[in-house]
C-alpha cells in the first residue's frame, strides 16, 4: 500500500468509516428463524447498532439495506421504524441479488465521500424462509409461478447457480478434491470460531417462537473427509460440485454504522474500518462465480495494492469451486481467506451475505489489533447472479 495513501482523495470530513458492525445469527432456511420476516431479522440489529455506536436515533440520515428475494415494500423503511427510529429517518432498499448487502455499504460510503458528514445504517437482510411465492401473469391472466427470476437475456446464457459453479470448476480446473478440502476446512474453522467465542460480540440474539436464538446453526462438528467424498454431483451428471461443497440457504441480517471520519471522532468512536474503495464488475454470466475476482483485481490495481499485502480476506463461499478459482485468479492462497469459516459452513443469506463479510472483517481486525497492535488491510468480495461481482477495500485503524 502507498505510504500515506489518502483513499478516495478525501479529507477527514469526507473519509468514509465504519464504526460499528453487527449481525443476527445465521440459521438454515426453514429452521430456527423460519417464522421471522425480514424486518424481524433486521430491526433488532439496527436498534442495537444505534445503541452500540452511541448515535442519536434522529441523527441517522438514512437506512440503506440490500435484499434479494423479499416481497418489496421497502424493507429498509419498515425495519427502521420497527427498530424504533423516528419517522423522520427514511429508508432505501437495494437489489443487486447476492451482492445487495455489500453494495448497500458501498453506496453509503460513496454518499459519505460526497460530503456533509452524514450517518448511515447500511447492510442487508434475507428471510428465505418467508420469501413470497413469485409468478408472472400469462396472457390469459393466469399465474405462472417460478422459482427464480431471470438474471440476463437468454442469449447470454442464464444458468442456475449450481450449473454456473460447474462451469467455473471446469473452466479453471478446480478439482473435486480441492473443493471438498476447502469446504471441510470452512466447517472446521467455523466450529472452532464458535467454540472460542469469536462470533459472540458480533451477534444480536433474536427472539423466535421457539425461544432466544443466539448462535449460528450451520457449522457441522462431525463432518469428515470420508463423508464429504460420498456426496454425489448435485447439479450436473458426473460433475464435481456437490451439496457438501456448496453453501446452503440461510436467514440472516447484518448492518454497519457508516459516517465520516470527522463525525466518527466527534461521536467518540475510537476505531473503525476506513473504506478505501469499492468496485463492481461485470463478467460472462455463464461464469458468474468469477465476478468477485474481476472486481477485486480492478480495485487493487486502482489503489496500487498487491493481493499479497491483504491481511484479511472475506469471500462469500457460495461454492467452494468459485471461491478457489477467484482466489487462484488473484494469486492468493485459499487458506488465507475466511479465517473463521464462511458461507459453506454458516450459510448464504443472499442479500445479507455481503454485509456479513464486513461484520466479520471488523471483528477479526479488532482481534488482530488487540493481539498484535497492527492496523489491518482487508477485502470483502462477493460474486453475483447475472455475471457480476463486488469488492470493498478496507483498512482497520484507530481513529
Image: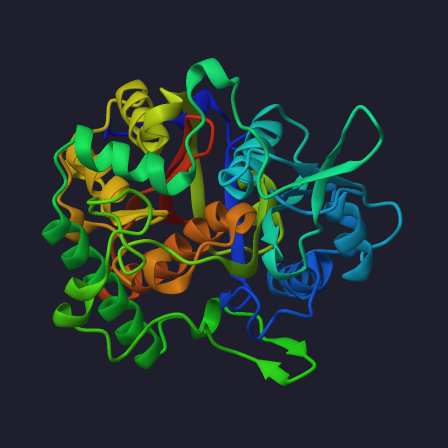
Residue 305 picture location, percent across and down: 23, 28
| Relative horizontal placement of residue 126, taking residue 182 as reference (left or right) | right
Count of marks, rendered view = 0
Q: Is residue 31 above or below residue 106?
A: below
Query: Which of 278 and 218 lies nearest the eye of the viewer?
Result: 218
Q: Is residue 130 left or right of residue 258?
A: right
Residue 235 image offset from top left, x and y in percent: 33, 46
Residue located 63% across and 26% down the image: 115
For the question of whether residue 278 can be seen, the reply is yes
Relative to residue 72, is residue 9 drawn left or right? left
Which quarter of the image is occupied by the N terminus?
top left
Report the residue that reaches farthest toward the bottom.
Answer: 211
Q: Quadrant of residue 169?
A: top left
Q: In the rendered view, would you say 96 is above or below 207?
A: above
Q: Would residue 399 be seen by someone viewing this image from the given angle?
A: no
Place of residue 34 in the rendered image (x, y in percent of width and height, measured from the top left): 63, 69
Query: Could you say which is closer to the camera, residue 258 or residue 173?
Result: 173
Q: Is residue 56 above or below residue 34?
A: above
Picture quadrant where residue 223 is located: bottom left
In the image, taking residue 156 as reference, residue 257 lies left or right, namely: right
Examine the image and state in which quarter residue 174 appears. Answer: top left
- The foreground one among 302 and 13 is 302
Q: Residue at x 45, y 23 (%)?
A: 8
Please, which colouring scheme is shown? rainbow
Q: Residue at (40%, 40%) from the top-left corner?
A: 161
On the image, the x and y values in percent for residue 187 come to 27, 67
* Furthest-front residue in this view: 140
Residue that lies at the very extreme toward the top in this rendered image: 155
Asked if residue 376 is positioned above or below residue 30 in the image, the reply reads: above
Amino acid at each position: 500500500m502507498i505510504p500515506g495513501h489518502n483513499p478516495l482523495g478525501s479529507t477527514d470530513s469526507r473519509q468514509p468509516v465504519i464504526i460499528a458492525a453487527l449481525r443476527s445469527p445465521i440459521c438454515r432456511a426453514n429452521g430456527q428463524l423460519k417464522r421471522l420476516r425480514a424486518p424481524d431479522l433486521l430491526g433488532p440489529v439496527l436498534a442495537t447498532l444505534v445503541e452500540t455506536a452511541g448515535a442519536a436515533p434522529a441523527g441517522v440520515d438514512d437506512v440503506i439495506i440490500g435484499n434479494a428475494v423479499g416481497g418489496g415494500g421497502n424493507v429498509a423503511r419498515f425495519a427502521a421504524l420497527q427498530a424504533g427510529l423516528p419517522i423522520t429517518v427514511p429508508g432505501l432498499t437495494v437489489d443487486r441479488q447476492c451482492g445487495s448487502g455489500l453494495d448497500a455499504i458501498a453506496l453509503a460510503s460513496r454518499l459519505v465521500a460526497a460530503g456533509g458528514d452524514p450517518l448511515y445504517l447500511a447492510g442487508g437482510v434475507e428471510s428465505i424462509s418467508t420469501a413470497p411465492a413469485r409468478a408472472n401473469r400469462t396472457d390469459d391472466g393466469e399465474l405462472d409461478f417460478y422459482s427464480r427470476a431471470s438474471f440476463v437475456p437468454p442469449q447470454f446464457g442464464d444458468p442456475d447457480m449450481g450449473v454456473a459453479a460447474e462451469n467455473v470448476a471446469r473452466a479453471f480446473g478446480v478439482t473435486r478434491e480441492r473443493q471438498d478440502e476447502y469446504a471441510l476446512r470452512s466447517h472446521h474453522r467455523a466450529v472452532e470460531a464458535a467454540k472460542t467465542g469469536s462470533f459472540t460480540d458480533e451477534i444480536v440474539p433474536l427472539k423466535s417462537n421457539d425461544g432466544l436464538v443466539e448462535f449460528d446453526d450451520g457449522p457441522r462438528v462431525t463432518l469428515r473427509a470420508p463423508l464429504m467424498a460420498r456426496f454425489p454431483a448435485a447439479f450436473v451428471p458426473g460433475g464435481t460440485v456437490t451439496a457438501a461443497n456448496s453453501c446452503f440457504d440461510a436467514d440472516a441480517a447484518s448492518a454497519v454504522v457508516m459516517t465520516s471520519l470527522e463525525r466518527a471522532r466527534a461521536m467518540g468512536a475510537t476505531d473503525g474500518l476506513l473504506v478505501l474503495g469499492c468496485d463492481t464488475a461485470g463478467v460472462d454470466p455463464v461464469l458468474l462465480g468469477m465476478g468477485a475476482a474481476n472486481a477485486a483485481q480492478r480495485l487493487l490495481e486502482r489503489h496500487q495494492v498487491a493481493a499479497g499485502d491483504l491481511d484479511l480476506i472475506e469471500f462469500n463461499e457460495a461454492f467452494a469451486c468459485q471461491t478457489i478459482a477467484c482466489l487462484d485468479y488473484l494469486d492468493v492462497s485459499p487458506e488465507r481467506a475466511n479465517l473463521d469459516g464462511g458461507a459453506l459452513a454458516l450459510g448464504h443469506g443472499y442479500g445479507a451475505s455481503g454485509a456479513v463479510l464486513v461484520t466479520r472483517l471488523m471483528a477479526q481486525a479488532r482481534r488482530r489489533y488487540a493481539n498484535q497492535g497492527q492496523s489491518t488491510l482487508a477485502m470483502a468480495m462477493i460474486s453475483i447472479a447475472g455475471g457480476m461481482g463486488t469488492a470493498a477495500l478496507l483498512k482497520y485503524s484507530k481513529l
